[in-house]
Image (tube, helix red, strand yellow):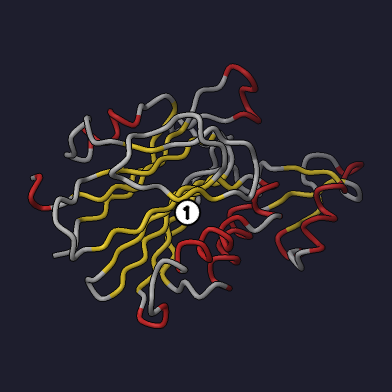
Amino acid sequence: MSPVVYTIFGKENESPERLLQKRGLSPHTPFFSLHQIHSDKAIEIHPSSPPQKTLQGDALFSVVDLNLKNRHSFALAVKTADCVPVLIQAEDQNKMIGIAAIHSGWRGTVQEISKKTLEALLKKFSHTSELSLKAWVGPSIQACCYEVGEDVAQKIQALKGEHFLTPSTRSPKRSTSHFMLDVPGLVCDHLSQFGIAEIERSLVCTQCSKEGYASFRRDADRRGTNWSLIALQFDQEN
């Protein structure tokens, strides 16, 4: 039987343990995270091994054979403070299940980290044509607040992502050299291009919303962290 998949998007300074507990899961569930470096590097996680906090990268993925015994619940986690958190589930007709957690800032998005993580994840499945894929894109800074200069805009345009750029609304004098960038929209476009039809996107802006999310653009070094987790819970542990 397939495990239950939980996706959890936390607010500022809610710990992974607290988020797991809020969803009715054990706060002692092992969770894996990375030292994030704004890269396109995806790390495969083996849940039978203890979590290592020294691994560097910006995406984690793991695939579990559902025919094996002695399976244990675990979670993958990324942290953000305006960047885009992406959670992914892939399932192969109740034989294998894969999950991924991605930290996608503008640099990782330009490097197409979501696509590269999906490629690495799907290589673990023998029949990708039979896969069921889902993605969740969590709260992040939205185009209403995310202003970038020409250097970033040119990199977005090189990806044919110009429709995710609009002239800056912050100052008329800057409208020809600065742009408002829809990073989560571009991330969703990459996921859709890869063939994921079921995508849930949050429209909450971490900078201007009053919902308690951490934002680097708003608070700089005074900001906290938003944790995002995707967890597998196996029935025998309930």
The mark total stands at 1
Q: Against 75, is 154 above or below? A: below
Q: Against 53, is 90 above or below? A: below
Percent across and percent down for residue 58 are 56, 43
Q: Against 15, is 4 above or below? A: below
Q: How crowded is mark 1: few (under 14 residues within 10 Å), some or many (20 or more)?
A: many
Q: Residue at x 68, y 47 (%)?
A: 106
Outermost residue on the bottom side: it is: 129
Query: Which secondary structure lies at badge 1?
Result: strand
| Depth order, front residue of 21/123 | 123
Percent across and percent down for residue 10 are 38, 36
The residue labelled by disc 1 is: 137
Q: Quadrant of the N terminus?
A: bottom left
Percent across and percent down for residue 55 are 51, 35
**For residue 15, what is the image quadrant?**
top left
| Depth order, front residue of 123/92 | 123
Q: Residue at x 41, y 69 (%)?
A: 198
Amino acid on which disc 1 is placed? Val
Q: Residue at x 51, y 47 (%)?
A: 59
Q: Quadrant of the C terminus?
A: top left
In the rendered view, does 86 fall on the left or right side of 8? Answer: right
In the rendered view, does 224 fall on the left or right side of 164? Answer: left
Percent across and percent down for residue 115 are 58, 63
| Depth order, front residue of 156/62 | 62
**For residue 29, what is the image quadrant?**
top left
In the rendered view, does 81 fall on the left or right side of 20? Answer: right
Q: Which residue is drawn at 50% across and 48% down?
A: 43
